[in-house]
Amino acid sequence: MKRTILASLLALCAIASQAQDTQNSNSVSPDSVIIEGVVTNIADGTRFMVLQEGVQGMQETIVKDGKFRIAIFQKEKESSLYIAHGHTLLEIYTEPGKKIKVIGDDAHSTNYWQVESDNFDQKENNAYNQFIKDKLSDYYELDNKWGLAYGRTSDQSLSQEERDKATQEYRELLQQREALRIEKYNAAILEFMASRPFCKRMITELSMIATYDKNLLS
């Protein structure tokens, strides 16, 4: 649900604003957030759009030699950036003057890309993802397949037949994923949350549980 809303935001921003290339900018403010990425299975020349929370428009960065780098000025003490890949978004919690490393593989949905940062909410987000990977591996794999299929539904490099096939796959995987969420994910993540400090990811998880399994919160 969250990724669908964010993808819609991406589409609206694309209409409202022309992307700006900051890849080769030589002037970097001390308040800029530096995002450095290392990616595999992604061709050089691939463009990533970057959205900043509360800021209209987008910037872009380009993959070269399996890496990308972008500096974005940030006034707020804490905010979020979203890196768009295909039709999914990777949320990165940011602070002025921070350097953040992103490690991505096109064989995985951006939801499971690794973000190395000392930001509290980012570290908690990583902890949640690691728990899902270790303890809910069947859900992890299913959700990853769903995210990749979702990205293919609007991939213009594919034929219409391939996109239609991806749409059917996406719908089937969504049903399977939500059945598994109710069967085991919600209860497991609630138990995990009991041992974690309050964070932004906890709000997201509770919202999803309230949507898909109200009985667990009663």
Image (spheres, grey):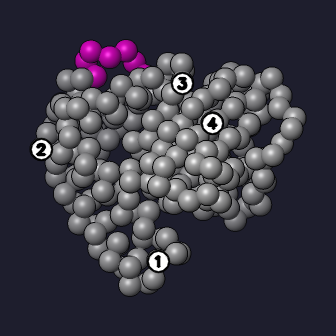
Which residue is the extreme one toward the front?
A: 65
Q: Position of residue 98 (x, y in %)?
A: 67, 23
Tell me the distance, in whole angstroms, between the alpha carbons under discs 4 and 2.
38 Å
Q: Which mark is residue 36?
A: 4
Q: Is 15 left or right of 67, judged from the image as shown? A: right
Spatial separation of the CA atoms under disc 4 and disc 3: 11 Å
Residue position for label 2? 183
Residue under pointer 1 = 158
Question: Would you call the spot at circle 1 few (<14 residues within 10 Å), some (14-19), or many (20 or more)?
Answer: few
- SS for tag 2? helix
Q: Residue at x 71, y 24 (%)?
A: 96
- Residue 23 in the figure: left or right of residue 38: right
Residues in magenta?
193-199
Q: What residue is at 51 percent from the left and 27 percent from the top? A: 116
Q: Earlier in the sequence, mark 3 or mark 2?
A: 3
Amino acid type of the residue that numbered disc 3 sits on in the rendered structure: Ser
Q: Name the side, left or right, on which 134 lies relative to 35.
A: left
Residue 194 falls within the magenta-colored stretch: yes
